[in-house]
C-alpha cells in the first residue's frame, strides 16, 4: 500500500457537515472491517467538543494533533474554504492530505499545493474520490464493496469510471494494491508521475492501470518516467475541442491534449491502451503472462 | 469564461499597462464624438466571442473621413455567423517591434507559466514550430505577489527594458483576476513607448462569482439551464442522449457509442447524489433536444440509490425510449420498478450502449 495503512490515524476536516459526517461513518465501518484505526479526529471551527459517530471534533487541526497521532487528512469542506484547509493541515505537519472538494478556483489550488510542498506535505486531489488500499485503509468516498486486495495499482482522474474499472478487475479476479483518484481539476497535487513513483517503491504493486482523460499531458509524462508495467485507458475520444467535459481539467486545448494524440503518445512509449474499460482486465492478465 | 478584448484591455489599463486610446461603440454614429481623440489612423475591431476574428473580416482599418461609414459596414457584417453588436474603435499605433507575452496554468509544474517571445503578432503555436529559439519561459511560484527581477530580465532578453514592468503587471492581473490565461499579443514598441495592442483573458469558471461575473457567456442557453440544475452539459449533435454520473464515466459512455458506430447527442453528468428529482430533470432536459431518439442512462456508484433513479426516470414521462444501466444500493428494487413500467435495464455499459445504437439506427 502507499500513502497509508491500518496504523494510519485519519483526520476529517469538515467533520460536522453532511458529507463529512456520512463518510466518517463509512470510513470507520471499513476500518472496523479491516482492523484499522480509521478516522480518529474531526475538525470544524466552532464545533470543538462535539462528536460525530463517536469521533471527537476539534476547532483546529493543531488541537486535534495535540491529542491524536494523525498521519493523513481528508477534506470535505466547501470550495471557498478547501484551500485554507489544505494549508492548515500542511502547516500542522500532516504528510498526506486528501481533498474531495470540487469547484475550488485553480488559483487557490495552485497556492495551497505550492504551500503544502514547502511544508513537505503531499496533496491528493482536489475534486477526487480519495484512495483505498483494500484490506488496509480507505481515505475518501470510494465504495469499498467493489474492491479486492491484490497487486495491481490504479491511478485515475475520475471517480465513477474508477469504480467501473475496479469492478471489472475484481470480477476478473484481479486484486488491487491501492486505488488512487488524483482528481479531475487542471491543477492537482499528486500527479500520475508522483503516484507512480510511490508504486515503484511499493513491494505489493506489480502493475498499474492508468485511467486518464482529455486535457493536459500528465498521463504520458507519468508513463515516461516509470519502469512499472502500465495499462492505460483514456476517456474522451468523442470530446469536442474547447468544451469542458464535466471536469474542470477535461478540456481539449491547443490541438495536443485530445484523446487520440494522448493514446498515440502512450502507444509510442510502449504502453498498451484499452479502447473500452471492459478490455482492461484481459490486457492486465496479458502483462502478467509476459513478465 | 473568455473576456472580450475591451474588457481585457480595461483590466490591463487599470493595472497600469498602457493600451491604445479607444472607445467601445454600439452604433456607427456614436463614433463621430470620438474622432478628435482617435485622430486620422483608426482601427475598428468587432467584439465578438469567436477566435480568428481578423481573418474573418472582423477588423477594419479606417481614417477620420471614412470611419463612420466603415463602422457601419462592420456592424452590417456577420463574423463567423455572429452579429456584430459592439465595436472597439482604437487609435492605430506606429509599430516598431512586436513581442508576445502570455501567462497560463502549467499542469505539470502546478504553477503559472510565463512565455515571452520575440515574435509577436503571430500565434504562439506557430512560433513553437518555426522559431522555438524566440521563446523564453519561466515558472512562477504563485505564493509570490511579484516576479523576481532576474526572472523579468531572463524573460525580456534583448527586448527594451520597458517590457519588464509590463510582464510583472500582467502577472499581477493573472493572480488578481483568477485567470487561466492572460495574453498580450502583440505587445508593441512604438515611438510613444510600449502598448498592449491586443489582449486576451480567460477567467476560471470556478471563480466567476468572486470576480463579479454573473452570466457565463461561453455557455449556450441549454448549457446554462443544465448548470442551474447542477449538471455538466455539452451538446454534441447526434441522436443518442446520454446521462451518466461522474465526468469520466459519462465521457467513457460517449466513446462507447462511437465505438459501436452511433452518435451521441450530448454529454450530461448528473453529478453526485442522484435523487429522483435530479434524474427527472436530467431526463427531461435531454429529451427536449429535438434530435434525440433514445436515451442511455448509465449510473454507477456505491451510494447511488437505484430506487430513486428509477422513480426519476418514470416521473420524467418522456416519449423517447430510455435504456438503463444501474448499479448501486437497492438495485433489485429499482430494477423491478423499471421493469413494471416496461423500461429496459441491462447489466453493463457495453450492453446498454450497443442496444441504444441499434435503436437509434
Image: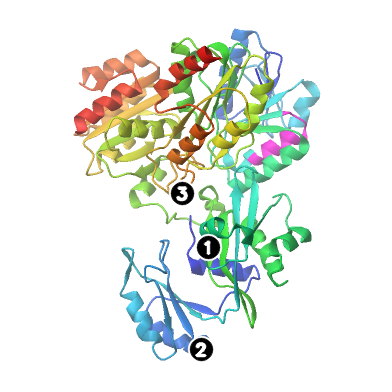
The chosen color scheme is rainbow
Q: Quadrant of residue A104?
A: top right
Do the CB atoms of the residues marked 2 and 3 lie less than 8 Å apart? no
Residue B322 in view in this figure:
no
Residue A238 against residue A228 in the figure, above or below: below
Residue identified by numbered label 3: A255
Q: Quadrant of the C terminus of chain B?
A: top left
Quote the CA–CA distance across marks 1 and 3. Answer: 19 Å
**Whole-percent x, y for residue B297 in the image:** 32, 29
How far from the left and from the top, in percent, is residue B205?
50, 49
Rendered location of residue A77, percent (x, y): 60, 35
Separation of marks 1 and 2 at Cα, in angstroms: 25 Å
Q: Chain of mark 2?
A: B
Residue at (36, 33) in percent of width and height: B255
Q: Residues within 10 Å of mark 2 (few under 14, many from 20)?
A: some
Mark 1 element type: strand
Residue B200: assigned label: 1
In the rendered view, would you say B130 is above or below B73? above
Q: Residue at x 57, y 79 (%)?
A: B95
Question: In 3D space, how far apart are the residues under numbered discs 2 and 3 (Cα atoms)?
Answer: 41 Å
Residue A121 image point, x, y percent? 73, 33
Q: Nearer the viewer, residue B124 or B305?
A: B124
Give the labeled residue for mark 2.
Answer: B39
Q: Secondary structure at mark 2?
A: loop
- Report the span colored magenta: A83-95
Amino acid at each position: 500500500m502507499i500513502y497509508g495503512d491500518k496504523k494510519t490515524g485519519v483526520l476529517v476536516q469538515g467533520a460536522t457537515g453532511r458529507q463529512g459526517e456520512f463518510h466518517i461513518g463509512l470510513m470507520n465501518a471499513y476500518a472496523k472491517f479491516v482492523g484499522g484505526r480509521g478516522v480518529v479526529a474531526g475538525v470544524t471551527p466552532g464545533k470543538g467538543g462535539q462528536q460525530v459517530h463517536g469521533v471527537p471534533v476539534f476547532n483546529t487541526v493543531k488541537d486535534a494533533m495535540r491529542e491524536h497521532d494523525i498521519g493523513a487528512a481528508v477534506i470535505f469542506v466547501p470550495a471557498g474554504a478547501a484551500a485554507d484547509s489544505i494549508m492548515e493541515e500542511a502547516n500542522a505537519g500532516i504528510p498526506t492530505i486528501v481533498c474531495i472538494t470540487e469547484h475550488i478556483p485553480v488559483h487557490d489550488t495552485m497556492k495551497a499545493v505550492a504551500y503544502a510542498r514547502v511544508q513537505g506535505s503531499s496533496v491528493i486531489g482536489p475534486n477526487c474520490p480519495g484512495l483505498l488500499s483494500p484490506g488496509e485503509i480507505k481515505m475518501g468516498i470510494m465504495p469499498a464493496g467493489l474492491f479486492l486486495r491484490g497487486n495491481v495499482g490504479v491511478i485515475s482522474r475520475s471517480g465513477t469510471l474508477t469504480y467501473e474499472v475496479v469492478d471489472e478487475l475484481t470480477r476478473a479476479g484481479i486484486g488491487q494494491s491501492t486505488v488512487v483518484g488524483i482528481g479531475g481539476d487542471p491543477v492537482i497535487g499528486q500527479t500520475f508521475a508522483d503516484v507512480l513513483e510511490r508504486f515503484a517503491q511499493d513491494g505489493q504493486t506489480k502493475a498499474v492501470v492508468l485511467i486518464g482523460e482529455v486535457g493536459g499531458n500528465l498521463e504520458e509524462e507519468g508513463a515516461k518516467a516509470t519502469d512499472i508495467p502500465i495499462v492505460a485507458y483514456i476517456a474522451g475520444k468523442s470530446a469536442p475541442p474547447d468544451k469542458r467535459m464535466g471536469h474542470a481539467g477535461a478540456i481539449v486545448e491547443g490541438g495536443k491534449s485530445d484523446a487520440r494524440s494522448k493514446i498515440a503518445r502512450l502507444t509510442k512509449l510502449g504502453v498498451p491502451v484499452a479502447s473500452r474499460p471492459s478490455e482492461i482486465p484481459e490486457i492486465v492478465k496479458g502483462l502478467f503472462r509476459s513478465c | 469564461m473568455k473576456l472580450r478584448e475591451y474588457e481585457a484591455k480595461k483590466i490591463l489599463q487599470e493595472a497600469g499597462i498602457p493600451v491604445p486610446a479607444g472607445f467601445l461603440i454600439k452604433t456607427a454614429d456614436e463614433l463621430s464624438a470620438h474622432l478628435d481623440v482617435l485622430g486620422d489612423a483608426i482601427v475598428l475591431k468587432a467584439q465578438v466571442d469567436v477566435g480568428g476574428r481578423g481573418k474573418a473580416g472582423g477588423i477594419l482599418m479606417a481614417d477620420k473621413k471614412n470611419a463612420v461609414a466603415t463602422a457601419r459596414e462592420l456592424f452590417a457584417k456577420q463574423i463567423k455567423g455572429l452579429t456584430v453588436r459592439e465595436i472597439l474603435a482604437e487609435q492605430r499605433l506606429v509599430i516598431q517591434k512586436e513581442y508576445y507575452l502570455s501567462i497560463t496554468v502549467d499542469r505539470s509544474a502546478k504553477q503559472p507559466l510565463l512565455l515571452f517571445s520575440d515574435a509577436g503578432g503571430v500565434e504562439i503555436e506557430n512560433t513553437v514550430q518555426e522559431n522555438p529559439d524566440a521563446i523564453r519561459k519561466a515558472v512562477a511560484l504563485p505564493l509570490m505577489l511579484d516576479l523576481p527581477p532576474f526572472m523579468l530580465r531572463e524573460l525580456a532578453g534583448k527586448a527594451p527594458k520597458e517590457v519588464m514592468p509590463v510582464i510583472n503587471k500582467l502577472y499581477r492581473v493573472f493572480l488578481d483576476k483568477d485567470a487561466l490565461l492572460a495574453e498580450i499579443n502583440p505587445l508593441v514598441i512604438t515611438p510613444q513607448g510600449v502598448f498592449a495592442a491586443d489582449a486576451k483573458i480567460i477567467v476560471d469558471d470556478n471563480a466567476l462569482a468572486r470576480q463579479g461575473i454573473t452570466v457565463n457567456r461561453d455557455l449556450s442557453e441549454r448549457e446554462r439551464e443544465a448548470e442551474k440544475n447542477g449538471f455538466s452539459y455539452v451538446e454534441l449533435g447526434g441522436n443518442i442522449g446520454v446521462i451518466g454520473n461522474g465526468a469520466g464515466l459519462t465521457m467513457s459512455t460517449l466513446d462507447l457509442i462511437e465505438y459501436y458506430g452511433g452518435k451521441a447527442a450530448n454529454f450530461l453528468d448528473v453529478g453526485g447524489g442522484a435523487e429522483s428529482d435530479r434524474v427527472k430533470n436530467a431526463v427531461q432536459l435531454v429529451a427536449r433536444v429535438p434530435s434525440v431518439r433514445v436515451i442511455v442512462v448509465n449510473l454507477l456508484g456505491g451510494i447511488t440509490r437505484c430506487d430513486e433513479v428509477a422513480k426519476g426516470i418514470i416521473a420524467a414521462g418522456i416519449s423517447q425510449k430510455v435504456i438503463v444501466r444501474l448499479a448501486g444500493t437497492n438495485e433489485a428494487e429499482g430494477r423491478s420498478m423499471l421493469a413494471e413500467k416496461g423500461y429496459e435495464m441491462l447489466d453493463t455499459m457495453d450492453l446498454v450502449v450497443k442496444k441504444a445504437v441499434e435503436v437509434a439506427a
